[in-house]
Image (tube, grey):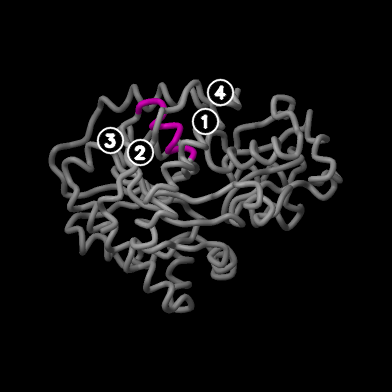
Amino acid sequence: MKKAVIGALSAAVMSVFAIGQAAALDEITVAYFLEWPTANQVAQLEKVYDKELGVKVNWRAFGNGNEMSAAMASGKVQIAYSQGLVPFVVAVSSGLPLKLVGVAVSYAEADNCVVSKASGITKANAKQLEGKKIGTPIGNVTHYKLLRMLDHLGVDATKVNMVQMNGADAAVAFARGDIVMGCAFGGPMLRMKEQGEYLMTAAEQEAIGIRVFDVISVTDEFLKKHPGLIQKFMDVTDKANAAYNKDKAAALPKIAKAAGMDKSGAEQLLKMFSFPSKADQASKQWMGGTVQQFTKQVADFFVQQKQMDKALGSYDGVVSAQFLK
């Protein structure tokens, strides 16, 4: 099922990409997530992007990063903000012409798998997950983390009943007791945590090499035709990140409103996030080489797990740091 979902996405995005993008450009659409508060949402709410880019900027919410890829393939979305790295890897590995142009947010604690307390399952007896039902969005960062954790804990992923669920759906199913473990990011993860425990903590995940960050991606066509708009988008984002770091309290109410959350929930998630500056992103720790290498590692792992048929030989060509100067 898992491979079929990713295969279906690959076929879908390639079939609709031929639609292309309109030549005239007086507005653009940016994909983002609700219940996923980010520093740039002050600029989103105050329409700073519209003013600086000189076009109307439509913000369209999606349930997962694969849906973002499909929308970009159709020409309906030009920029994906905070797209998960794994959906990006799946898309470009299947031939979808996208470019990773920035790192939106680095996080580890804000994306996780929560086990029901009633199940009695912990990392110590994780093999009991075999034969059980787990809700997770397939083919994204959450899914990648799940597979890495299962592998580390000696659980045979092929014996686990993984059901495709976006975060909000997983939280509902978890509350009803329909699934023994739910994997999600943002608000839905926090709701499940009220009735469960993390399979592995963020620190434990990082110790085994799981790195989690979301990216800013654009279509190749948009990059070629409108690099100036991308540069302005990156500049506005960088200034918004800096303003947030300078005065987080002032930014919180606006970010919460744009994210569709209350201030308490937004603040809880924001404490788990970091927003690297353009200078940081351009360094070796990020897009100066590490992102490209880690992207290759993620792709190879998915091939090993039979989640993708093949990986690219290198991912250097789908990462561009030209807008970080």
Mark 1: secondary structure: helix
> Up-down: is 36 above or below 177?
below
> Up-down: is 272 above or below 248?
above
CB within 8 Å, label 2 to label 4:
no
Q: Which residue is mark 3?
A: 75
In this rendering, the label closer to the viewer, 2 or 4: 2
Quarter of the image where the C terminus is located: bottom left
Q: Nearer the viewer, residue 301 or 236?
A: 301
In this rendering, the label closer to the viewer, 3 or 2: 2
Residue at 51% across / 25% down in the picture? 308
Task: Give the percent coordinates (x, y) of residue 258.
Answer: 43, 62
For the residues labelled 2 and 1, the Cα–Cα distance comes to: 15 Å
Amino acid, disc 1: Asp
Magenta part of the chain: 86-95
For the residues labelled 2 and 4, the Cα–Cα distance comes to: 25 Å
Q: Nearer the viewer, residue 233 or 173?
A: 233
For the residues labelled 3 and 1, the Cα–Cα distance comes to: 28 Å
Q: Is residue 7 one of those drawn in magenta?
A: no
Q: Nearer the viewer, residue 54 or 147?
A: 147
Q: Residues within 10 Å of mark 2 (few under 14, many from 20)?
A: some
Mark 2: secondary structure: helix
Mark found first going from the N terminus, 1 or 4: 4
Residue at 74% across / 44% down in the picture? 176
Q: Which residue is mark 4?
A: 3
Q: Is residue 93 one of those drawn in magenta?
A: yes
Q: Which residue is mark 2?
A: 316
Amino acid, disc 3: Gly
Q: Residues within 10 Å of mark 3 (few under 14, many from 20)?
A: many
Q: Main secondary structure of the magenta part?
A: helix
Task: Give the percent coordinates (x, y) of residue 189.
Answer: 63, 52
Mark found first going from the N terminus, 3 or 1: 3
